[in-house]
Image (cartoon, grey):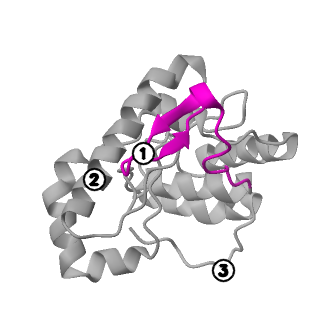
Amino acid sequence: MSSRRRFGGRLVLAGMASAVALVVTGCGGGGNGGDEVASAEGGRTSAKASTSSSGELAEYVEAQRKWVTCLRGEGLDAPDPDAKGKVELGDQSKWKRDPKALKAQEKCADLSVPVPESVEKAQQPELTKEEIRKNQQYAECMQEHGAPDFPDTGADGHFRDVTWDSTSAGAKRATRACASIIGIPDDAPTPQG
């Protein structure tokens, strides 16, 4: 279960950005003394972030710890958040079917917070020149083929804004027309959701 609350075009865009980036960010890391923060179980975890978002990151990680502590209080085996606040819960379908997990999620929902924008941006992987070029081409293609509100990319190649209407007929047409730019086969099934 992710603490992010992204729907519609946001979810599709996040998936596309992941497909283009082909880079997985690391979790955790080695401890560096003063860079450690306490875990929900009393242990210590390395926390590294840029200066500009470190306060917001610390608040987010602390909120995630409180959420995990609540889940554990309801009898679930939830791991500590990593240094970036991510909580790996494993098989998502199990968490959606298990009555105990559903009850715990409902009880702890008010403690689950969305990822702050500054933290999300700091966690974006650095893209190669080729990935940046593909994202730029993809944005232009989408805008030219029926999704004029599709976001542009910044100089770093990441999409500037993830809010766009992915449900319109034009957006669906554009998605089909431009999918091959980011490596999605023309005959791939249309994403649902």
Give coordinates of residue 64: x percent, y percent: 35, 45
Q: Which region is colored magenta?
A: 23-49
Quadrant containing the C terminus is: bottom left
Name the amino acid type tagged 1.
Answer: Ser
Residue pointed to by mark 2: 69
The vertical placement of 130 against 49, above or below, is: below
Which residue occupies the foreground of this view, 99 or 131?
A: 99
Does 103 sit left or right of 159 as displayed?
left
Question: Which residue is drawn at the image coordinates 46% and 31% (left, top)?
Answer: 57
Name the amino acid type tagged 3.
Answer: Asp
Earlier along the polypeptide chain: callout 1 or callout 3?
1
The vertical placement of 32 against 144, above or below, is: above
Mark 3: few/some/many CA within 10 Å (<14, 14-19, 20+):
few
Q: Which mark is residue 39?
A: 1
Quadrant containing the N terminus is: bottom left
Which residue occupies the foreground of this view, 72 or 60?
A: 72
Tell me the CA gap for discs 2 and 1.
10 Å
Earlier along the polypeptide chain: callout 2 or callout 3?
2
Tell me the CA gap for discs 1 and 3.
45 Å
Residue 25 magenta = yes
- Of tags 2 and 3, the one toward the viewer is 2
Question: Which residue is drawn at the image coordinates 43% and 30% (left, top)?
Answer: 58
Does 129 sit left or right of 85 as displayed?
right
Tell me the CA gap for discs 2 and 3.
44 Å
Mark 2: few/some/many CA within 10 Å (<14, 14-19, 20+):
many
Q: Can residue 150 be seen in the rendering of this structure?
A: no
Residue pointed to by mark 3: 187
Label 3 sits on a secondary structure element that is: loop
Q: Can residue 27 be seen in the rendering of this structure?
A: yes
